[in-house]
Amino acid sequence: MLRSSERRITVVLADDQRAIVDALTRLFAEQPDIELIGAGRNAEEALRLCVEHEPDVAVLDVRMPQGGGAVAAIEMRSRGLKTRVVALSAFDDKATRDHMMAAGAVSYVLKDRPVGELLEAIRQAAGRRSPGEDVAG
């Protein structure tokens, strides 16, 4: 549960596979601390949504039309957006991972991994702990 002083993590999602967008939309709706504020299907739509809404986190498919996540991430940085990028990919090769990280992604999550890994990457990118996570001390 969110503390009264914390607002939800705002997220923009971009993936050219409708099934992925639909599944992640449902997943995010179940999270008390995450709010999906826009979804696109290519790099241009991702950039437009991020400029318009300035989300905390953008979950960007690495390979999608109009340059993929790297193009969107680079353009976001060049415009001074503070949105943190989480790369989402079906590709586990070093070159793709390195390219996305160099473009500004703060983490790289594979599509075939448990959904908890993506949720944790979003929370870490936003500087939050998981709901219910104990505070040490």
Image (cartoon, rainbow, N blue to C red):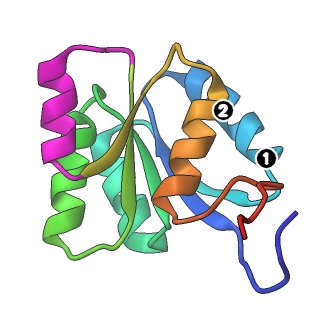
- Label 1 CA crowd tier, 10 Å (few <14, some 14–19, many 20+): few
Mark identifier at residue 29: 1
Amino acid on which disc 1 is placed:
Ala
Toward the front, the furthest residue is: 137
Camera-nearest residue between 25 and 5: 5
Quarter occupied by the N terminus: bottom right
Q: Nearer the viewer, mark 2 or mark 1?
A: 2
Residue 82 appears in the rendering: yes
From what the image shows, is residue 38 above or below residue 1?
above
Left or right of 94, for residue 125: right
Which image quarter is the C terminus in? bottom right
Q: Is residue 39 visible?
A: no
Residue 135 figure quarter: bottom right
Q: Secondary structure at mark 1?
A: helix
Name the residue: 66% across, 32% down. 116
Residue that carries the numbered disc 2 in the rendered image = 116
The image position of residue 68, as x and y in percent, is 25, 35
Residue 135 lies in the magenta stretch: no
| Residue closer to the observer: 70 or 96 | 96
Q: Is residue 128 left or right of residue 107?
A: right
Q: Main secondary structure of the magenta part?
A: helix
